[in-house]
Image (spheres, coloured by chain):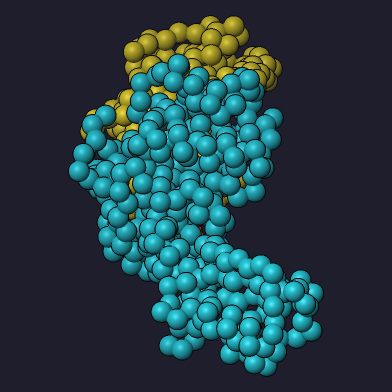
Chain colours: A yellow, B cyan
Amino acid sequence: MTGFNAYGVWAIYRFEMARALRTVWQSIVTPVITTALYFVVFGSAIGSRMTEIDGVPYGAFIVPGLIMLSLFTQSIFNASFGIYFPKFTGTIYEILSAPVGPFEIVLAYVGAAATKSAVLGLIILATAAFFVPLQILHPVWMLTFLILTATTFSLFGFIIGIWANGFEQLQMIPMLVITPLTFLGGSFYSIDMLPPVWRTITLFNPVVYLISGFRWSFYGSGDVGIVWSVAATFGFLLACLGVVWWMFKTGYRLKS
Amino acid sequence: MTTSPNAPAIVIQGLTKTYASGLQALKPVDLTIAKGEIFALLGPNGAGKTTLISIVCGIVNPTTGSVLADGYDIQTQFREARTRIGLVPQELTTDAFETVLATVTFSRGLFSRAPNPAFIEKILRDLSLWDKKDNKIMTLSGGMKRRVMIAKALSHEPEILFLDEPTAGVDVELRRDMWALVRTLRDRGVTIILTTHYIEEAEEMADRVGVILKGELILVEDKTTLMKKLGRKTLTLNLIETLEAVPAELAEWNPTLIADGHELQYEFDANAEDTGVPSLIRRMEALGIGFKDLNTRQSSLEDIFVSLVHQSSSQEKAA
Ligand SMILES: Nc1ncnc2c1ncn2[C@@H]1O[C@H](COP(=O)(O)OP(=O)(O)O)[C@@H](O)[C@H]1O
Ligand SMILES: [Mg+2]
């Protein structure tokens, strides 16, 4: 009986997945339509006037960045909402009184959020394939980056969900931090296209490394070396795990 | 699931809670509850009942002290402890969009139990929820929602059940069902700890009563002993002729006139050496005040409780 509560993890995971299926329109259809609009605007309307970047047509070039943008925002949204909502309604009492430890709670909530956003990433990828010619040179790396990024940002969302004291705070970080960093992080351009000063500044944007690595798995080239991307991906993952570990160790904002 | 045959259901030692606000919700509490017992925690609003239960169930961290559930430490052996515990919280907090069946099935899994659809069906039928099993919880009435919360708490077959103000604001039918349920569970050997500020609930159901006031467990007693020990009785005399006022000659008994002077009431300590009853009757005879009938009534827990509250607050003033 000591040890791992697999039934408990499965119960929470299923609950979270059922929530997504109930709101399938919101969780899947909306991001797909948004992505399709990006392709219409950036891929076709603007992209036709853009030159190729690193030998990749502009429409295809932006696909990894777009998927990353969705992964970031959806992972954070799913995970933060998933843990914040029971706190808000009070149903968290049941989780707190159940024989599930921190590891199981994180595994279930973050696992469900990461699953949803990774599936969404693949759906967006499939949508993109309708609009532009795609090429994936390193499919295993592509999936690895996809899953690790979904996991990392779901952990990040989980942290936000525990920290947040209101719906405003819940939306603040994705809006104020993640979206700007993603747009300025080379989702829609190669940072080589920037003037040298801006290029150096951009290198401080952590998101650059994630997008660059993901793009490398598609087209074999990125803004920074692949080793840096892998290091950054794992670095973020470990940082988020560390914060989550600290939160549970100190009982931060979960229990009075 | 193995149980520890000799361990009491709950052992609480030196438990205190001070909230971040600085409010001390629990002064050191020591309490042992035997297996199969029905224990009522009685106290006014804000006394610390929910805090105490929440600590045992793992929802609130204790400040100091320890709790064992069936011999397992609730902090270091929380898995063993919590699988044995079921909780129906005071507040109606349920998921809105889940169905009844889904949410009860969820609870069973959460508490580390293998799926058992037949058992879940039985619980839902026992609680008159089976017809509603596919309804979303938000479509249910408040009483039905409370039934759902009970079903969730019972879904993993707990040996120790906490009911936090189970009948506060519920209709008569649910209250009756709840009492019936408590008796069935008791017959099955489940230990039940309930909080209430309805005295009749403790009186009706409990084997033992603990009275908690301002975070302090001021008294724990067998219900019957408590009633005997602190029980006061009221003597009511039906007078032949009505009285306008209590005659000065009876003032030392301090009786009261009720029913427009048709009845005289005298309250006394049933366990006292001298209850004052025979002397009162002799004095009335001497005064020529006749009565047709008389009866005595045991004070309810409510009366006991009120007198305890008074005692404790007057002690506080004195201190
Ligand atoms: N989370 C909390 N933070 C601060 N004070 C609290 C909290 N929960 C309860 N209290 C306070 O602790 C005291 C005991 O509350 P509670 O245990 O809910 O009492 P009861 O259940 O007997 O009505 C009250 O004064 C209440 O205001
Ligand atoms: Mg309470």
Is residue B123 found left or right of A10 in the rendered image?
right
Is B17 above or below relative to A143? below
Residue situated in front as seen by the camera: A37 or B261: B261
Q: Nearer the viewer, residue A205 or B319?
A: B319
One can see residue B309 in this view: no
Residue at point 51%, 50% (across, down): B204
x, y (%) of residue B235?
59, 71
Foreground of the two, A26 or A250: A250
Q: Is residue A86 shown above or below B283?
A: above
Instruction: Describe residue B49's horizontal placement relative to residue B62 as left or right.
Output: right
- Residue at position x 72%, y 74% in the image: B239
Q: Quadrant of the C terminus of chain A?
A: bottom left
What is the quadrant of residue A141 in the picture?
top left
Q: Position of residue A221 (x, y in %)?
A: 39, 19
Which residue appears farthest toward the bottom when viewing the image? B248
Residue B283 appears in view:
yes
Image quadrant occupied by the N terminus of chain A: top left
Kindly identify the residue that appears in the image at 47 percent across and 39 percent down. B182
**With respect to residue B54, does B307 lie above or below?**
below
| Residue at position x 26%, y 29% in the image | B1
Residue B246, position in %: x, y?
Answer: 71, 86
**Residue B143, percent across and down?**
64, 38
A177, B116: nearer the viewer? B116
